[in-house]
Amino acid sequence: MPESSPLPAQYSVQPIYNYQWVGIDGATASCQAILQAGTYATMQNNALSYGFWYEFYPKDSWLMDEPDISPGDSVFVQVKAHNTTSGYAYMKNLSTGKDITINLEAPAGSSLCDSTAEWIQENATGGNSGDAGLAPFNTFSFDYCHALDVSGNNYNLRGSEKWFMQPNGNTICYPSNVLGGSVQINYNGPRA
């Protein structure tokens, strides 16, 4: 779990959110439903907190207080689709041993395409956070990354697309050291 360090200017546009997540679909215009789960850092009322979260987009996301997470903790997150409209998210804090499983249903009219898998760092766009930008965070990595399709084929990160966060043409978040099962996520934007 990376530590987030909001910039002074971001205190005036709270709440802000940094999300780290794994997910199924949502990477193309024709497949906008996303089964996703991961960790978050949020600052509200000048207080910074961390936790797990999940979502079957376009339903709203749910941020959880339990199990507890602290910066530096190692976590395991898995999302699995039973079919195109249902699945689950399993989240475990490996540093404390506490875990939780959440069963999820797609919103009416939405379904998965089962076409892509993602490992993402982003700033959520709820509330004022779209104006706040990405809060600085410590470098971290997604490890043991793999995806299984309905036929049992196992995929890792070899040959995967690399996405960069580049507001106004300036790269502030980028992947590096992309190996078969891991990728490092780096922050390169302004700091306090």
Image: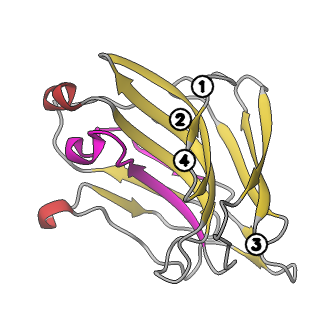
Residue, disc 1: 69
Query: Where, quadrant-wise, is the C terminus in this rendering?
Result: top left
Classify 1 as above or below 167. above
Residue 25 in sight: yes
Range covered by the magenta-colored residues: 117-142
Residue, disc 4: 60
Residue 172: x and y, percent? Answer: 24, 54
Residue 149 falls in image quadrant:
bottom right
Which amino acid does the dot numbered 2 rest on?
Met
Residue 3: x and y, percent? Answer: 42, 30
Residue, disc 2: 1
Is residue 61 inside the magenta stretch? no
User: Circles 1 and 4: CB distance less than 8 Å?
Assistant: no
Relative depth, front residue between 71 and 151:
151
User: Circles 2 and 1: CB distance less than 8 Å?
Assistant: yes
Which amino acid does the dot numbered 3 rest on?
Thr
Looking at marks 2 and 1 on the same chain, the residue that comes earlier in the sequence is marked by 2
Which color scheme is applied?
secondary structure
